[in-house]
Image (cartoon, rainbow, N blue to C red):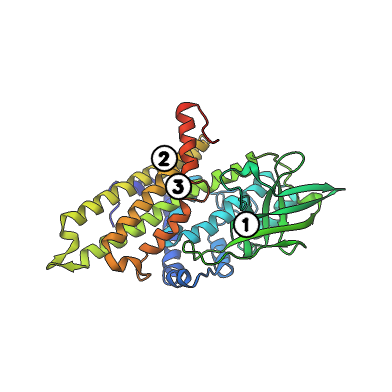
Amino acid sequence: MDDLLRLDDELDADQRLIRDTVRSFVADRVLPHVGDWFEEAVFPARELAPELGSLGLLGMHLQGYGCAGTDATSYGVACRELEAGDSGLRSFVSVQGSLAMFPIWKYGSDEQKEEWLPRMAAGQAIGCFGLTEPDHGSDPAGMRTYAKKDGSDWILNGSKMWITNGSIADVAVVWAQTDDGVRGFVVPAGTPGFSAPEIHKKMSLRASVTSSLYFDDVRLPASAVLPGVTGLRGPLSCLSEARYGIVWGVTGAARACLEAAVDYAKTRVQFDKPIGAFQLTQEKLAWMYVGLAQAGLTALHLGRLKDAGTLEPRQISFGKLANVRAALDIARQARSILGGNGITLEYPVIRHMNNLESVLTYEGTQEIHTLVLGEALTGLAAYR
């Protein structure tokens, strides 16, 4: 499908190389199988993680410790191409790099960085991020997970929910209330009292591992604490990193849906001509492309701001709110163009559409991002 606005002409040679490399990987290793993974509710993380690591995609925007050290736009392009395969694939990479590796890289001790980051960058160790709780999603300040000092150790109790990679993770970065405020803890899998059962019966993000985390008197040494941050700014800064990847990623899912719709409209014959020759179908396709191109412009602009070091959280909220809604609209229109075929896994549309229903909610619901923009416009907070 033509890039009518020539947005990718704005990418430099290295960014185009990353685009082509990730697109080829997705075409060869993901697209032939992802429909089956979705149907069977499996994700071969242990198989794919070393391959993703060898491509430099895990923690790719971080410096040192075996990370690729790319710019933010390159990271965004990679997220776009990964999510054109499946939102679950992009989620795996986002959680690994932006939610598990980033806080260790940004706030961890030298020992924590040396222990975990090189292995995580290589895909030899998998991480997860524990913030959301069963009763506290949009309001993380109300979290009940608590860590209490016991001599030089910490005792961690509580639970987390909707945790990507949780059941397969080698390490969890867990945020908990303490007497001194919210702190982050590096919790290795297998620590006594720590369990991570998988959540089943999902109708979205089926090619992704989603889990609960439980902490029952988990004893952690003082060295488990992330020493570089106290308070909610720690986990919220991680969420900003992940949300930035979503801004780009959903444009990949939307592009895959639009491409499927265009191909189908050109070959599906009704009333003696392809349905793409009917004005109603062309109107749908035209507006779908307008939405995709506008989302692409937003992602590219935010990437430029992030590379310049001037990107603000409220700007990321704009991108997450606008681009996820645009991608969902495109997926739903594509579903209608494909008719009955739109609900089968023979085509990617229903899989992307279902996945995007989760992306709409995680890393901040559309309602929360709406309130972020409302506060930016009025100066008045309306969260409570």
Mark 1: which secondary structure? strand
Q: Amino acid at mark 2?
A: His
User: Residue placed at 57% from the left, 50% from the top?
Assistant: 98
Verify CB contact (< 8 Å) between mark 3 and mark 1.
no
Toward the top, the furthest residue is 379
User: Viewer-nearest of labels 2 and 3?
Assistant: 3
Which one is nearer the viewer's eye here, 64 or 51?
51
User: Residue placed at 79% from the left, 54% from the top?
Assistant: 220
- Gap in Å between the C-alphas at discs 2 and 1? 29 Å
Indicate whether 363 appears above or below 166: above
Question: Which mark identifies residue 128?
Answer: 1
Mark positioned earlier in the residue sequence (3 or 1): 1
Residue 322 shown left or right of residue 290 in the figure: right
Label 1, residues with CA under 10 Å away: few <14, some 14-19, many ≥20: many
- Gap in Å between the C-alphas at discs 3 and 1? 20 Å
User: Residue placed at 28% from the left, 60% from the top?
Assistant: 336
Residue 148 shown left or right of residue 358 in the figure: right
User: Residue placed at 21% from the left, 67% from the top?
Assistant: 267
Q: Amino acid at mark 1?
A: Cys
Which one is nearer the viewer's eye here, 96 or 383?
383
Question: Which mark identifies residue 247?
Answer: 3
- Gap in Å between the C-alphas at discs 2 and 3? 11 Å
